Amino acid sequence: MSFASSLYFTGAEVGLSLTGLVLLLVAAWGGQKSARMVTILAVAGLFGAAIFSMHLFDLATSEVAGRAFGDLYRADAFGSFGKVLIYLAAIAVLMVTPRFFDQRGAYRPEYPVLMLFNAVGMGMMVSATDLMTLYIGLEMSSLSSYVLASFLRQDSRSAEAGLKYFVLGGLASGIILYGVSLVYGFTGGTSYEGIRAALEADLSTGALFGVVFVLAGMAFKISAVPFHMWTPDVYEGAPTPVTAFFATAPKVAAMGMLVRMAMEPFAGQVEAWRQIVIFAALASIVVGALGAIGQQNLKRLLAYSSINNVGFILIGLAAATPAGVAGVMTYLAIYVAMTVGSFTALLMLRDPMGNNLETFADISGLSTKRPALAWCLLALMFSLAGIPPLFGFWGKFVVFQAAVQADLVALAAMGIAASVIGAFYYLKFIKVMFFDEPTRELETESPLGHWVVLGLSVLVISPLGYLLTIPLGQWSAAAAASFTAAM
Amino acid sequence: MEFPILSLMLAVPLAAAIACLFLGAQSARMLALGATLFDLALGILLWANYDIGGAQWQFTERAEIFAGFSYALGIDGIALMLIMLSVFLMPICILASWDAITKRVGEYMAAFLLMEVLMIGVFAAQDMFLFYIFFEAGLIPMYLIIGVWGGDNRIYASYKFFLYTLLGSVLMLIAMMWMVNEAGTTDIPTLLNYDFPAGAQTWLWLAFFASFAVKMPMWPVHTWLPDAHVQAPTAGSVILAGVLLKLGGYGFIRFSLPMFPEASAQFAWLVFGLSMVAVVYTSLIALVQHDMKKLIAYSSVAHMAIVTAGLFAFNVQGIEGAMMVMLGHGLVSGALFLCVGVIYDRLHTREIDRYGGLSINMPKYALFFLLFTMASVGLPGTSNFVGEFLALAGLYKVSTLVTLVCTTGIILGAAYMLYLYRRVAFGEQKNADAAAMLDLNAREWIMLAPIAAAVLWMGVYPESFLAPMRQDIAALETRMARAAPEGDSQLKIGAPKEHNANFVAAAHEAEGAH
C-alpha cells in the first residue's frame, strides 16, 4: 500500500483538484472573458476523471479493491460506478448552463471551478471508508453547492435559496457529525471496518443513537421525508441549471454515501436501520406524490418528483441485499438520465425575449408549438411515472424485485400502489402539453448543445434503453459485489 | 430458424408509427392503412400456417437481449384468434378515422399503430414480464387518443381510464415478481404447469384479479369504461371495446385459471356473484341511457360478465363459449360503435332522441345496424349466439341459479338493443336534419361489410374459429380439473337401456299387424 498506489487510486479526485486549482488561477487572471474556456477545460477534466474511474472500475472487478491512504479511502467498483454517474451528470449540466446565465449577464468562470470542487467532494463521498474522509468530502461538496445555489447574486430568490440551503445543510451536517461522534464514542474507531467489527455483536443504545443520527443527517442530504422540506424551496429558487445539478450529481453522491454506510459499517445491524429506511421510503413516495399535485411551478414539481424517486431508491436499500444495492445503482443511473433530460427540456422553454419559463401555464399546448420538445418531455414524464415501455419502468422494476426477493412483499406492494398517485401529476404535465390549447409565444430554436443532452437522455429512457439492461445489470452487480468482497 | 413472422407483425406497424409522426395528413392516412392491411395479410398467413392439432406453442421466437426477462414470442390457438381480431379491426379503425379526424392526423395514426403493436405483443408474449410491458404500455397511446382527439369531457375520461387501469395493474407486477422468484423462470409455458402453494395462490390470484377485473371490466370497477367510451373518438371506442376489453379475459385464461386453479375454484363464487350483478344491473342501466355510446358501453359490461361467468365454469363449453363471446363481442360492439360513428359524423350528436326513422332515408345503414343489433342480442345465426349458448351451457353444469340469472341478461339485452333500434331507425322522421342524412358511402361500406360477413360466418360455421382453440382449451380444462367445483345439477347417469327408447312402440306396431 505505497503512497504511489494511494495516489493512483485517488487519481480522479487528485486530477480534478489540480484542474480546479489551475482553472481558479486562470479565472483569477483571465477574468470574465475566460469563462467559456474555463468551462470547456472543466468539462474536459470531468471527462478525463470519468474515463479514469471507468478504468478503475474494470480494475476493481478483476482485482482486490484498491485501498488508499491507510484505510481512509477505497477505489472499488461501487465508488467508480457512482463517480462515473456523478461526472457525467456534471458534464451534462455544464453543457446546458452558460446560456442560462449569459442571458442575465451573470456567467462567471468561478461556476465551472465550483463544479469541479463539488465533484471532488462528491467523489470522496462515494469512496470514503472512514468517517473523517466522508465528512470532508461531504462538506466540500456542500459548501460549493451553497455558493452555486446563490450564484445569481442579484436575484433575491436565488439568494434566498442559497441561504436556506446553507442553514439547513449546516444543520444536517451537524446532525451527521453528532451521530459520527456517538458512533466513534461507542465503537472506538472511525474506519468503516473497525465500526463494523465493533457493531458485530449487540448494538448498544448509544451506538444506536449514533446510527439514527447519521441516517437522519443523510436523509437531509438525499431529501428523504421527513427531512425534505428544504428541497422544493431550494429547487425553485436556485438557477435552473443549478437545480438540474442538485437533482442529479449530489443526489447520486449522497445516496452512494448512504448505501456504503448502510452496507459496510452498519451491515451487521440491518434490522436496526431497515425500519428507518422503510419508513423514509414509503413516506417519501407518498409525500413526494401528494406534494406535487398542487404545484404550478415546474421546478417545484420536479423537486417533489425527486423526493418521490428517492423513496423508490430507498426501497432497494431496504432490501439490504446485493440485488438491492444493484437495484439502487441501476435506478440512480436511469434517474440521472431522466432528470438531466427533464431539466434540459425546461431550460429550452423560453419566450421570444429569451426569458426562461417555468410554470404549467407556459407549457400549455406545447405539442403544437414545439412538437419535438413536447414528445421528448412526454417520454420523460411517462418514464418518471414508471410506465413501460419507457426505461424508467426498469428502475422501479429492479428495486421492487429486490424487495420481493428479500421477502419485503408488503413494502413492495405498498410502494408500487403509492406510485399510482405519482402518475397523476406526471399525467398532468402531459395533459397540459398535449390536450390544452397554446396560450403564449415560445422561442422556436434551441442551441445544439441542449438538443444533444436532451436527445441522449431521451434515447436512454426510450424503449431502446432496454438493450442496456444487460450491461447495466452487470455493472450494478459488480458495484454491489464490492461490499461482499470487502467483508 | 423459421421466419420470425410475429416479430415482423410487431415491426411493421412500429416502423409505420414512427414514420407517421413525420408525415402530412393524407400520406399518414395512406401509410397507416397500408401498414395495417399488411399486418392483416400477415395475420391471415399466420392463421393459414397454424398447425391445428400440432404443437401447443407455435411460431416461437426467443432472444436473450434483456436482463431479467427474455424477448420470447409464440402463440397458441387462443392467442391466434385474438391476434386475428386485432389485425382485422385495425384497418377498419383507420378507415373510420379517415374523415372524422382532421387535426394532428400523423400523431393520431402513430398512436393507433402503436396500439396495434402493443396488442399483438400482449397476445404473443411468452415471457411474463414482456407480457406486462406490453400490457401496461397500451395505456400510453390510449390516454393520448382519448385526451387529444376525444369529446368535450375528454380530460376527465382520460385521467380516469389511465389511473384506474394503472392501479389495477401494479399489484399484478408484484405478484409476478413473487412468482418468478418462487418458480425461478419468467417463461409462461413453464409457469403454466408450475404448482404454486395453495396458500400463496389466494394472494396471487387476488393481485391478478385486481388487474384483469378492471380491464374486463367487471362490476363494480367498470365505471371507467362508459366515460372512456363516450369521450373517445369512434375508432378509439372500437379498439377499446373490440380488443382492449379482451385483455382481461385473455389474462384470466392465460394466468389466473391455469396458474392458480385452486384459488380460482375458491373464488369462483366471487366471480359468479359479480357477474350476476353485472348482467342484471348494467343491462338495466343500459335500458335508460340517452346516449348511444353509453348504452353500448354498458351492454359491453353485461356481455363481459357472461365471459367471466363462463370462464369460471371450469369446463370446456364454458371456456369455449367465453372465447366465442369475446371474439363475437369484439366484432359486434366494434361494429355498433362504427354504426354510431357513421351517424355521429353526420349530425355530431350521440343523443338517441335526435334521430328517428333512419330506415327511411338510410335504408342500407339501417340494414347493417339491424344485423349488428340482432347479433348483439344473440340471435341464432350470428356470432354472439354461439358464444352465449356455449357459455351458458357450460355454466349450467355448475350452477342452475347463475345460469338463470345470466340468461336474463339476454332478455334484457334484447330489450335495450331493440328499444335503441326502434328509436333510431324506426318511427317517424321527427328531426328534419336527421331525415336529411345521406346513406352509407363507399368508405363506410368497406368498413361495415367485412364485419358483417365475419359475424355471419362465426354464427353459421363457428368450427373455423373453434378448431384452432380446441386443443388448448382441452389442455386448460385438464390442468384445472383437479380443482373443478362440483355441479349442482347432480345428474344421475343410469345404466344404459337394452333397447332404444322407442322400442316399445315398435313392439306395439308388430302386435297391430296381427
Image: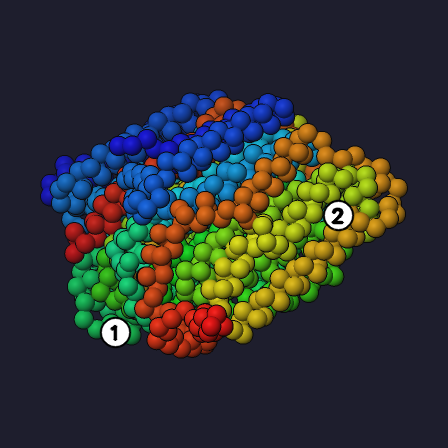
**Which of the numbered marks, if any, corresponds to residue A204?**
1
**Relative horizontal placement of residue A465, taking residue A343 as reference (left or right):** left
Which is nearer the eye, A399 or B358?
A: B358
For badge 1, the amino acid type reads Ser
Q: Is residue B285 above or below residue A251?
A: below
Which residue: 48% across, 70% down? B513
**Which of the numbered marks, if any, corresponds to residue B350?**
2
Which residue: 57% across, 55% down? B385
The percent position of residue A274, horizontal first and vertical second, equals 33, 65
Q: Is residue B107 above or below residue A187?
A: above
**Which of the numbered marks, if any, corresponds to residue B259?**
none
Which residue: 45% across, 35% down? B44
Which is nearer the eye, B410 or A129?
A: B410
Element type at mark 1: loop
Which residue: 45% across, 76% down? B488
For badge 2, the amino acid type reads Arg
What is the chain letter for disc 2?
B
Q: CA distance from mark 1 to mark 2?
A: 73 Å
